[in-house]
Amino acid sequence: MSIKSNDTPRIRRSPEESRANILAAAEQLLVEQGPQLLRLADVAKAAGVANATVLHHFGSISAVHTALMERMIGDLVDSIMAIEIPADAPVEARAVGLKTLFDALETPGAARLAAWLELTDETSRLTVVREAVQEVAQKKISQAGVPEDVAEDMILLSVTLALGVGLFGPSLGKLIGKPEGRARELTLQMLLANFQRLAG
């Protein structure tokens, strides 16, 4: 007489696949619950792994937060680097770049996660930020004839304002009776006008 096992067979993954699986589960929970409610046990359950597996790959739930944000930053940089900048249309390229940035930070969870990292003093762990800014400034914006220090200022201003729009734009606009998307529209207009002045 054979005995059937009710245990689900374990899926063998490479370390990279295991980390990606955990981060995908964490991102889904982030969107549903917000970063403040993200718990290691919930992430492990959603990923179909043991708590110890999450700890092995990340060490703590704070490190999961950081890894999620770094993955989002990496995806954003890849999207921006893929934008073509025609020599005769730098303004249009800037508009596409800003739209890409705002879209990324208005996705559910992204701006809230960034704010949570700041509020919990975890922002300093985002070691990829400097590298990401330099890559975009040097390899994308400066190629359009903008000095590197000005390019970095443009990124600083854009990200700061995009985070503000992502966090407060929709709710504040609704509270004061503005049309949906008005905060984003005004911010993009202001940024494009300012960049035109900075870029000369």
Image (cartoon, rainbow, N blue to C red):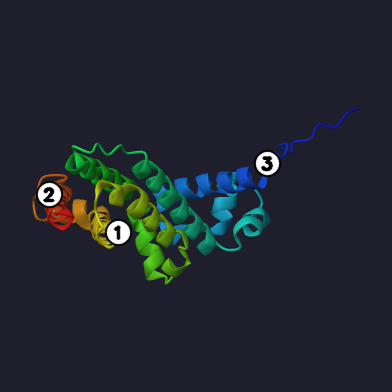
- In-front residue for pair 48/102: 102
For the point 46% across and 45% down, the residue is 28
How far separated are the C-alphas under marks 3 and 1? 42 Å
Residue at x 79% of width, y 35% of height? 5
Q: Quadrant of residue 195?
A: bottom left
Q: Position of residue 65 (x, y in %)?
A: 48, 58
Say which of 192 and 75 sits in front.
Answer: 192
Disc marking residue 29: none
Would residue 48 be visible to someone looking at this image?
no
x and y percentages locating residue 57 in the rendered image: 63, 56
The kind of residue tagged 2 is Gln
Residue at the limit of the structure toward the left, as seen here: 177
- Badge 2 is on which residue? 189
* Residue type at the position of mark 1: Glu
Disc 3 marks which amino acid? Arg
Between disc 2 and disc 3, the foreground one is: 2
Give the number of the disc on residue 13. 3
SS state under label 3:
loop
How crowded pointer 1 is (Cα within 10 Å; few <14, some 14-19, many 20+) is rated as: some
Which of pointers 1 and 2 indicates the residue nearer the eye?
1
Do the residues under discs 1 and 2 have CB atoms within 8 angstroms?
no
Q: Residues within 10 Å of mark 3 (few under 14, many from 20)?
A: few
